[in-house]
Image (cartoon, grey):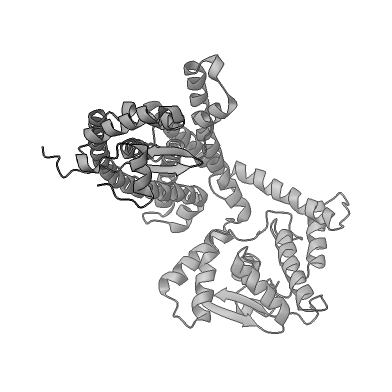
Amino acid sequence: MKTKNTKLLLEMSVADGKYDFTSSIFAALNQAELEIQNLDETIESIHSLKPNCDKLDYILAASSGALCGIVDIFLVGKPGESPCGVITDKWFADRTTDFAKLCGWKDKGKNSLSSAIRFLEKKFKIPYDQRGAGDAASFVFGLNPTNHHFKSLAHNPSLLGLFFSILDQFTNSSHFISGGELISLADADGKFELRGNNITSKLFCAIANWFGHLISDVSGPSGNNRRGMGIPSPLWTWTNDIIALKRSLNIPVSQFDKSINELAINIYKAGYDTRFQSAQAIPVFVNEMLVRLVYAIRRLIKYYAEIDKETRSFSLMWRKCEPFSNPTVKRMLTVAHGTFCTLDIGEATIRGLLTGAGTFNPTEFFLRLNIVGVGRFTISLYGEVKREIGIQKAQREIFFARKERIVVEDYIEGLKLLSELYDDKSLLNFIVDFENSDMFLYAFEKSVMLAKKRNVPNNEILRSKVEIDSYFLGGNKE
C-alpha cells in the first residue's frame, strides 16, 4: 500500500493561550455511531405498525363479535320487534321532556310527553311543517303523516337539512323531495315570522328553531299515543341530499337515485328512524368496548407477571396496556366487527329471502341490516388498508436502511483500524502538555513523532516553538 502521497488533516486552534487539537478519526467514529443509532430506529419503526396478535387475541375478538351479533339478531331485530328499541324510545322521550323543561315547560303529569312536544312545537315555530293531512301538500307532494318528516328536507338531521331550514325560515317556504323531484312551496305559512332584528339575530333564531323543532319531532307527533314517526336516520337522509344537489345543479336524477330514495322512505315508514338507529348502535358499542377491555386485561396480567415489583410504574403499565392507539387492538376490532357484520348480514339476507315469497325483499333486508355496524367495520377496513400501505413503505425504507447499516459498520471497522495505526490516543494527549510551559520541549518531541508516523516529509516538520511561531507569523521554514 502506497502512503507517499497520503495526507491526513490534523486541525489545531489557539484560544486563550491554549492549544486545541481535533482528531478527524474519532470525530468520524462518533458520527458513524450516531448514524448506526438512526438506522436502528428506522429498522425498529415497523414494529409500531404491525399488529402483534396471538391466537387467543383472534379467538377472543371473534367471540366478542359473535356474542354481539347474537344480541343484535334477538334484541335489536327490526322496528316494532326490538326490545332495545323500546329502551331507546324511552330514552329519547325522557330527553324530549328534559329539553322542554329546560325551555320553560311545566310538567303536568298525564300525557306529559305529548304536552312537552306541543310546547316545543309552539316555542320553536317553523313554516315547513306541512303534514299532508288535509292540506295542499297531500295533493302536491304526496305527503302524509308517515312520510312528511323524511320528505321535508328541513326535517333531515344533516347539514343540508340545516341549510334548507334556514332558507325556508328566511323565505317562508318549504322544500320537499318527492318522486325524485325537488319541490318548493312558497308562502308556506302566512302566520310565520322569523324573530330577530338583524341578519345575525335572525340566523341564530333560525338555527335554534331548527334544532328545537327536531327535538320536538324525535319522539313522534304530539297527538299520538302510539309510537309515532320520529326524525329520519342520518345514515339514510343522504338519499334526499343526492337528489336535492343534483336538481339544484341541473344534473339528471338517475333511476337508481329514485329507487334508493324510495327504499329509504319505505324503511322509514316501517319505523327505521333516529331512535331505532340508536338501538342498533348498542351492540356495536358493546362490541367495541368489550374488545378493548379484553385486550387491556390480558396485557395487564402479562405486565404484572413479567415486570418486577421494583420497576413497575403507571406510565410503563399504560404503555403496555392502553387499548386505543396500537395496531394490535385495531386488528382485534377489525376481526370483532367483521364477525358481527357477517352474522348480521347473514340473518338479514335470510329474512329478506323468507319474507319475499320466493324473491328477495330489500325492505326487510335493510330493516334488519345494522348500518351502524357496517359503518364501523368499514372504518376498520380503511384503517387496515392504510396501515398496510404504511408497512409497505416502511419495509422499503428498512431494506435500504439495512444495506446502509452494513456499509456504515464496514466504515466503522476501517476507522478503528486507522485509529490503531496512527495511535491517536497516545500521541494526541500532548494537548495537556501545551498548557504547561515547562513541557514544551517534550510536547514538541511528541508532535515530531506524530508527524513522522504520519509520513510528513522531513523538510516540512516543525521541530521547535520558534519554527512554529515563524510559520504562523508568516515566516518560511527553509
Q: Quadrant of residue 443?
A: top left
Front-most of residues 8 and 410: 8
Front-most of residues 118 and 248: 248
Residue 174: x and y in percent read: 66, 77
Q: With respect to residue 179, does 114 lie above or below?
A: above
The reply, left or right, for residue 156 in relation to residue 8 is right
Q: With respect to residue 175, does 388 lie above or below?
A: above
Front-most of residues 157 and 199: 199
Residue at position x 67%, y 49% in the image: 89
Residue at position x 39%, y 46% in the image: 387
Q: With respect to residue 235, does 181 lie above or below?
A: below
Residue at position x 57%, y 55% in the image: 272
Work out which residue is located at the far left of the displayed protein and give it. 1
Q: Quadrant of residue 100?
A: bottom right
Residue 228: x and y in percent read: 68, 57
The reply, left or right, for residue 34 in relation to residue 229 is left
